[in-house]
Image: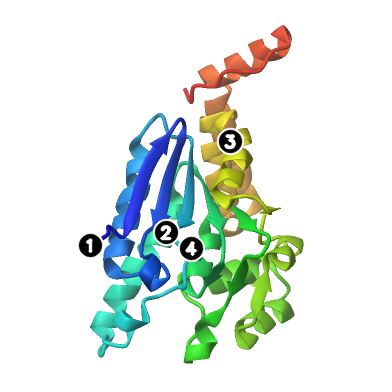
Amino acid sequence: MSIPIKYEKRDSIAFIAMNRPEKRNALSIDMANDFVDALKEAEKDPEVKAVIISGEGKIFSAGGDLEVLHTLNNSAKIMEYMKQALAVIQTIRELDKYVISAVHGFAAGAGFSIAVAADFVVAKKDAAFVCSFTNVGIIPDLGLLKELTDNLPNAVVKEWISSGRPIAAEEAYHRGMVNHVTEEDVVEAAIHYAAFIIDGPPLANKFVKHMVNHADEWSSGTNDLQETAVQTLLLQSEDNKEGIQAFFEKRKPDFKGR
């Protein structure tokens, strides 16, 4: 029996692969729990600067495991499943490190939710994103509805959700939901895309991620206070000193995350 999540570290990148290709990488409870554990392992590893999420087999993920979902016959069981699945999304968002999703085939339903919960999306040119929820009479979950609403016009969100049509990678790119489209192996493309993260300052990137993710929750005054507090901290960091020295020495900085 295969493990539902594969975890590997190479250089400064942690690779997390959904590994239920026979089930089209549907999100089971075991997969959700192992997914969170893998993300937390990457979080605590000081050598890891970026995380790449992918799917084994022909597709990224078909979404929730319908074989499990149709057995959940009361509110308590449904809420428990939703809580465990949502923990994946919340952990991706709150991770101190940047996460890249590498999407091939298609990302449907909860697979779509996972893909766009990442900080960056790299997609194979023939990949597609599908809001398949209404096909089974439900609404988008795991944060997808808000993610789409925050980034797209309302009319587009309603169309994508209620039509359930596949959204081609190129369309998603032009709508700002995908950062990079490739014809090459999508994980390799994600590795190349991650270069600016690997070479960048880990401390500053951590704060950029969290402040951008929470900016819509703050007033301008609160944001100003947050910026000032973070900048005061970073201006005293070793990375800041290294960046300034590298600037004057006309070389590439060697950031340590300190």
Which residue is label 1 attached to? 1
As shown in the figure, which amino acid type bears the numbered disc 3? Ile
Q: CA distance from mark 2 to mark 4?
A: 10 Å
The answer to whether 148 appears left or right of 64 in the picture is right
Could you tell me which secondary element the residue under label 2 belongs to? Answer: helix
Element on which disc 1 rests: loop
Q: Residues within 10 Å of mark 1 (few under 14, many from 20)?
A: few
Marks 2,1: beta carbons within 8 A: no
* Residue wearing tag 3: 197
Residue 90: assigned label: 2
* Secondary element at tag 3: helix
Q: Earlier in the sequence, mark 2 or mark 1?
A: 1
For marks 2 and 1, give the CA distance.
28 Å
Circle 2: residue type? Gln
Report the amino acid beneath label 4: Ile
Q: Residue at x 26, y 87 (%)?
A: 71
Task: Classify the position of the N terminus by image quarter.
Answer: bottom left
CB-based contact (under 8 Å), mark 4 and mark 1: no
Mark 1: amino acid: Met
According to the picture, the residue beneath numbered tag 4 turns out to be 114
Disc 4 crowd rating (10 Å Cα; few below 14, some 14-19, many 20+) is: many
Task: Quote the CA–CA distance across marks 3 and 4.
Answer: 20 Å
Q: CA distance from mark 3 to mark 2?
A: 21 Å
Mark 3, residues whose alpha carbon is within 10 Å: few (<14), some, or many (≥20)?
some
Which mark sits nearer the N-terminus, 3 or 4? 4
Q: Residues within 10 Å of mark 2 (few under 14, many from 20)?
A: some
Mark positioned earlier in the residue sequence (3 or 2): 2
Q: Is residue 86 left or right of residue 210?
A: left
Whichever of labels 2 and 4 marks the residue nearer the N terminus, that label is 2
